[in-house]
Amino acid sequence: MDTYTLSNGVKMPVLGYGMWRNKNPKEAVQGVIDAISVGFRHIDGAAAYQNEELVGQGIKESGIAREELFLTSKLKNDAHGYDNVRREVQKTLDQLGTDYLDLYLIHWPVVHGHGDDWQTDNLETWQAFEELYDEGVLKAIGVSNFSVEHLENLVNHARIKPMVNQLLVHPGVLQTETRDYCTKHGILVQAYSPLKPLSVLKEEARVQKMLEKYDKSIAQLLLRFDLQVGVVPLTKSVHRERIEENFDIFDFEIDDEDMQYLKEWSHPEFTEPDNKNERPPQVS
Ligand SMILES: NC(=O)c1ccc[n+]([C@@H]2O[C@H](COP(=O)([O-])OP(=O)(O)OC[C@H]3O[C@@H](n4cnc5c(N)ncnc54)[C@H](OP(=O)(O)O)[C@@H]3O)[C@@H](O)[C@H]2O)c1
């Protein structure tokens, strides 16, 4: 699969398999095995998803070599702070059955108890990320759900700039201001929940015409849209046929007019998530 090269030279496959809301042990393990056998080499997990042991089991059962995979995890919201990061990373490594992560992210910028001091909280947390990066345990480090003000805090005051920002990106939620800032600072954007507007968009006559024209499904159109925007879509399914479908997006191109339509499309149901206020601890 094609890759992006991060600002530190690490290569990331352009499409990833996500693990959110995938806690049924049988489905989670089989999903990872299926994703790897279909061709996914990039798995996006998080401590908050409470399934890292299942990801590790799936990887082991798949028989793939560790170095063939790009593995991401995220620091959970109730474990911010310099003193917690090393322990949390070790827990994740043990559960995944590996001794390094390709990418580790701060999951949310403003967490419970840090509404007023999120700047210091993020900088102290990030310092531990930098140390584990220096030690080679984390091959790349980044953030998730960070807007410009949250990014500026790290870019202006930390020793190492984030290499990645993982954001909600799909037609209706383009996060243009944040993406532009990321581009300017060499931060690659990953797109989570790329299929969120699937059921609403597929009712649109114009979109139905696109599906006929490209002979692709609505899921494939949405994933391809993110690829052409220049972000890395992360997509989750526990059904093998959908995993295959979601991987089959490299043999067509959405033309400029259709891209423009999808970029301009909006719907009141779809807005940027609230990342300014404290994220409740139980929400991933
Ligand atoms: N950083 C963050 O805060 C954050 C937040 C959300 C997500 N994420 C990451 O991003 C990943 C992707 O987001 P997401 O889980 O919301 O994924 P998604 O791929 O946008 O949506 C997944 C949903 O769509 C269904 N689906 C998958 N393929 C389909 C297809 N071809 N046709 C119709 N329906 C399909 C899935 O159902 P079935 O499984 O039943 O097929 C599931 O309900 C997550 O898994 C997680 O790793 C990160």
Image: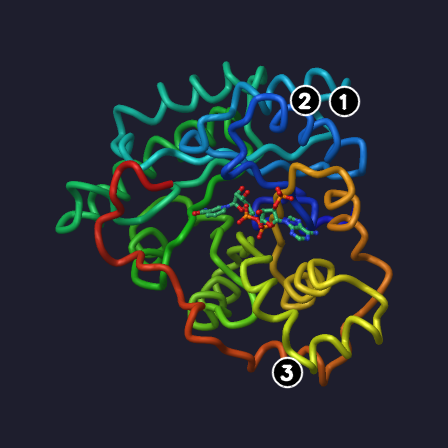
Q: Is residue 97 left or right of residue 255?
A: left
Sequence-wise first label, 2 or 3: 2
Viewer-side residue, 241 vs 109: 241
Q: Which residue is mark 3?
A: 261
Q: Secondary structure at mark 2?
A: helix
Q: Tell me which amino acid carries mark 1.
A: Ile
Q: Residue at x 59, y 63 (%)?
A: 199
**Quadrant in the picture for the C terminus:** top left
Outermost residue toward the bottom in this view:
257
How far is the residue under mark 1 from the one under mark 2?
7 Å
Q: Residue at x 35, y 19 (%)?
A: 87
* Badge 1 density bin: few <14, some 14–19, many ≥20, Cα 10 Å: some
Picture disc at residue 64: 1
Sequence-wise first label, 1 or 2: 2
Viewer-side residue, 29 vs 66: 29
Determine whether label 1 and label 2 are within 8 Å by CB.
Answer: yes
How far is the residue under mark 2 from the one under mark 3?
39 Å
